[in-house]
Image: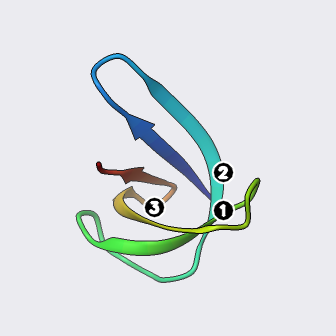
Amino acid sequence: MVTVIVESDTLKITTKGIAKEKGQPGDVIKVINIDTKKVIYAKVANNSMVKVEF
């Protein structure tokens, strides 16, 4: 399980997800949002956190 962070200058959203791929910091991997069951792609920040960039 990983923490998924979506962040802009004025907003920060945090949720939980399941990493479906392995990756190193900076890699973009597939993550399943636990709440919505939707696939998202996020950049690995560390071994327990990914960040969605938009």
- Residue flagged by tag 2: what amino acid is it? Lys
The residue that label 3 is drawn on is 47
Which badge, 2 or 3, comes first in the chain's sequence? 2
Residue 12, given in percent of the width and then of the height, sits at: 46, 27
Picture residue at 66% right of the left edge, 51% below the top: 16
Looking at the image, residue 4 sits to the left or right of residue 8; the answer is right
Q: Which residue is mark 1?
A: 1
- Dot 1 falls on a residue whose secondary structure is loop
Distance CA(mark 2)–CA(mark 3): 13 Å
- Which mark is in front, 2 or 3? 2
Residue 14 sits above or below residue 10 on the image: below
Disc 3 residue type (three-letter):
Asn
Answer whether labels 1 and 2 touch (C-beta < 8 Å).
Answer: yes
Residue 39 higher or lower than 3, as above or below: below
Q: Counting residues from the N terminus, which is met first, the one under dot 1 or under dot 3?
A: 1
Residue at figure coordinates x 29%, y 48% from the top left: 54
Q: Which residue is mark 2?
A: 16
